[in-house]
Amino acid sequence: MYINLLANSGLTAVPNYAKNSKEKFLSNVKFSQKLNYRTVFDMLDIEINDRCFKSFSEGINFLKEKNRKNENTIIGVTTYYLPYSKDFKNKRYISEYETRTIGITNHYILVIDINDEFLQVYDTTPIVCNETLSIDNLSKAWLGDSKIDEFSKIVGIDSLSPYTYLEIDIKKDIKEKRIMELSFQLLATIVFEYLDGKVLKDGETNYFYGITANVMVIEELRDISNRKVLSEKEVHQIEICLIEMQISRCFFRDFLKDISEINSVYIKIFNETNFLLEEMKKVISKIRLIFARKKYDVNRLNENFDILEKLFKKEKMIYEEIESKLTSKNKVNSGTLIFGDLFFERRE
């Protein structure tokens, strides 16, 4: 519960789309921070700092000591050396690293058990999974991205350190009731922002959220496809945008799974969301493949845009169903929701 709650701090689950006069097809899960809500960490009074060990053996001893105390540890690794990851020794991970929307950062996993040969880890991206990792695999993965030879000349890569872990300072006792409360506050806020579909302007860039982001990306895809020939840069930007909008939905799906374990009413909704996400992945993959061709079929693209648009409409219905479950007694203003005590707090 804690991992997916924290992973959605900053409303990463709210899909977004951005554009300005120079660029279209911009999307980044971090853009949702512009909605200006307090973070989960702030509301729980938790302070998190990156720390690192001087050696692998020092780190292993720390993990074992934490394990003896029945305490879990979050560590920063590279997915390039995680055997269960799609990035495992994948050349695309190397070639596309500098253009990632998440920038230069390690990947974080939770260590839940460890012995002399193996450790058990919990990972939430791109799917929730419990995996067994050998100590030998960890010795490579825990070096992080900065120790991959091909990355040595990337500006800023030296900001990452090997053997990183998160030092979590919980400043006050957190009751389970408070976690449950906050989880439903977060769910309600994600649903509100998705259905509200805000448009924010920051400088020359317009940021679209939720249902408005969905409408805009379909409009822009249809518009640009009429040009019939796109540059490699444009195709890559479309790919990154669609993948990022897909990632926001992965955050929501994983969080919803935890919610369904708290309240079985949401099991059906989680299953529908998971199925819808898999269908979106398929159609987005098809769109990317068609765009990647030098001469693409506009009719085939439009067929897939139609499918994606229908999936967005089904997604909206799922959000409306969640909305009705959360706020059946709190509807005001002809259906516009004011969540009251369910609402996340905004930053001052």
Image (cartoon, rainbow, N blue to C red):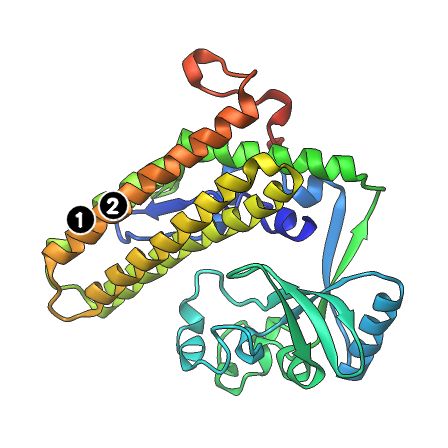
Residue occupying image coordinates x 38% and y 58%: 243
Q: Residue furthest top?
A: 333
Pick whichever, 31 or 257, lies toward us: 257
Residue toward you, 273 or 298: 273
Residue 282 placed where, x, y %?
Answer: 32, 59
Picture layout, residue 330 above or below residue 67: above
Q: Name the residue type under label 1.
A: Arg
| Left or right for 300, reference 118 | left
Q: Does residue 271 appear in the picture of this structure?
A: yes
Q: Quadrant of residue 91?
A: bottom left
Q: Quadrant of residue 61?
A: bottom right
CB contact under 8 Å: marks 2 and 1: yes
Q: Residue at x 41, y 50 (%)?
A: 275
Q: x, y (%) of residue 313?
A: 32, 37
The x, y position of residue 129, in whole percent, is 59, 63
Kind of residue indicated by mark 2:
Ile
Q: Position of residue 132 (x, y in %)?
A: 66, 74
The quadrant in which residue 334 appears is: top left
Q: Helix or strand or loop: what does disc 2 sit on?
A: helix
- Residue 218 numbered mark, or none: 2
Q: Would you place residue 94 above or below residue 225 in this image?
A: below
Name the residue: 45% across, 55% down: 247
Residue under label 1, please give it. Answer: 222
Mark 2: few, some, or many residues within 10 Å (few <14, many ≥20)? some
Q: Quadrant of the C terminus?
A: top right
Q: Residues within 10 Å of mark 1 (few under 14, many from 20)?
A: some
Q: Is residue 138 left or right of residue 169?
A: left
